[in-house]
Image (cartoon, rainbow, N blue to C red):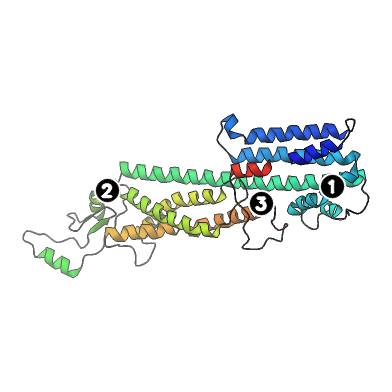
């Protein structure tokens, strides 16, 4: 962009009104360079820096196009690139796009043609900015929800460690006939309890009290919820890694796939706990009495992975947001082919593309 501004400035006379516009365009480019010079301002590279730099770049491009108002014929060599910018973001039915497409390089151009080109380029740049801001807003919302779920998971784990007997993640499967007969044959044994108590990190095969709640309170451990949430977290991490293969790369500086993966982790921890509580309450017929701690952990892993049932809708929305953000070489709006992947890059690589 800077090379185009300098080349156009050299072709104009000192008295041309376009000189002032090109000077303003040069100032916009300097502002973009300053935003992206992370070593100079010693700030952490963020997507907002790239977005702000793109705003300055868009302003510089508009000022550069307007500088041709005094010499419309000079814009002819740049018509293909300007048309590409317009086609990249405006649909085929847009009147502003049609006005630029109707301009022929072989025809003589007037200042009215330059005005139409300027309006079309400005509209295309506005659409491009909205696409990126939409992606930024989506990522921010996902991170906020992920943070809330993380705090909720930590709070549940903390409260359960302080009061493990309130809502224990324990089960009371019925003892086998052989175990009851062996227990009844022991000398001094009163009427044996017909069940044993199994928790995620411990068990009591010979509970002493006939009251189920008393036995559950005695067997429940402070680390039960922590172990279950870790199991769900690990399963959700595997689900995140598997789901990333379905997410296309992004041309935006905002980490949409990373935010989606981060959302799955606390969701997996919570679904592991919630699923076991549903099983303990008899919500799943036939699975209300797990026989061992290993079975409880196994089901925690299954429930942790099952958070995909809820987060898949967020994944689909994230994919739609990524598809709406177009870059050079992407199909025009409405013509994107499934399976195409735009080039992804971070703030530094995009900074190089801008300058």
Contact check, label 2 and label 3, Cβ < 8 Å: no
Q: Report the front residue among 58 and 324.
A: 58
Q: Position of residue 323 (x, y in %)?
A: 64, 55
* Left or right: residue 111 compared with residue 226: right
- Residue 10 appears in which quarter of the rendering? top right
* Residue in the image at 36% along x and 45% along y: 157
Label located before the other in sequence (2 or 3): 2
- Residue 173 appears in which quarter of the rendering? bottom left
Q: Is residue 289 above or below residue 166?
A: below
Q: Position of residue 289 (x, y in %)?
A: 30, 62
* Residue in the image at 66% along x and 63% along y: 337
Q: Can I make out residue 281 in this image?
A: no
Question: Which quadrant does the N terminus fall into?
Answer: top right
- Please give the residue where the numbered disc 3 appears in the rendered image: 325
Q: Report the front residue among 54 and 155.
A: 54
- Please give the residue where the numbered disc 1 appears in the rendered image: 117
The residues tagged by marks 1 and 2 sit, at their Cα atoms, a distance apart of 71 Å
Contact check, label 1 and label 2, Cβ < 8 Å: no
- Label 1 secondary element: helix
- Label 3 secondary element: loop
């Amino acid at each position: 962009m800077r090379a185009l501004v300098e080349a156009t400035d050299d072709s104009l006379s000192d008295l041309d009104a376009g000189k002032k516009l090109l000077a303003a365009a040069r100032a916009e480019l300097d502002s973009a360079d300053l935003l992206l010079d992370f070593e100079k301002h010693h700030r952490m590279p963020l997507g907002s820096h790239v977005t702000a730099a793109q705003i300055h770049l868009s302003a510089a491009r508009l000022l550069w196009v307007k500088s041709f108002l005094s010499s419309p014929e000079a814009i002819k060599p740049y018509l293909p690139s300007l048309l590409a910018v317009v086609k990249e973001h405006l649909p085929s039915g847009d009147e502003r796009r049609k006005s630029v497409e109707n301009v022929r390089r072989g025809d003589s151009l007037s200042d009215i043609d330059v005005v139409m080109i300027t309006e079309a380029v400005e509209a295309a740049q506005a659409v491009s900015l909205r696409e990126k801001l939409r992606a930024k807003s989506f990522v921010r919302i996902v991170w906020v929800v992920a943070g809330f779920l993380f705090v909720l998971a930590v709070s549940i784990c903390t409260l359960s460690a302080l009061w493990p007997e309130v809502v224990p993640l324990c089960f009371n499967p019925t003892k086998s006939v052989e175990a009851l007969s062996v227990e009844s044959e022991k000398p001094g044994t009163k009427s044996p309890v017909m069940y044993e108590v199994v928790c995620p990190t411990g068990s009591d095969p010979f509970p002493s009290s006939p009251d189920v709640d008393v036995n559950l309170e005695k067997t429940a451990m402070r680390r039960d919820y922590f172990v279950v949430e870790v199991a769900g977290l690990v399963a959700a991490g595997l689900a995140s890694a598997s789901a990333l293969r379905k997410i296309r790369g992004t041309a935006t500086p905002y980490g949409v796939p990373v935010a989606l993966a981060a959302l799955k982790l606390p969701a997996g921890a919570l679904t592991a706990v919630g699923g076991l509580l549903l099983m303990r309450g008899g919500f799943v017929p036939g699975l209300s009495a797990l026989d061992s701690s290993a079975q409880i952990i196994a089901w925690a892993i299954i429930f942790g992975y099952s958070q995909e049932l809820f987060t898949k809708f967020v994944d689909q929305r994230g994919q739609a947001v990524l598809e709406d953000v177009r870059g050079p070489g992407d199909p025009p709006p409405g013509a994107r082919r499934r399976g195409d992947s735009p080039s992804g890059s971070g703030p530094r690589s995009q900074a190089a593309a801008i300058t």
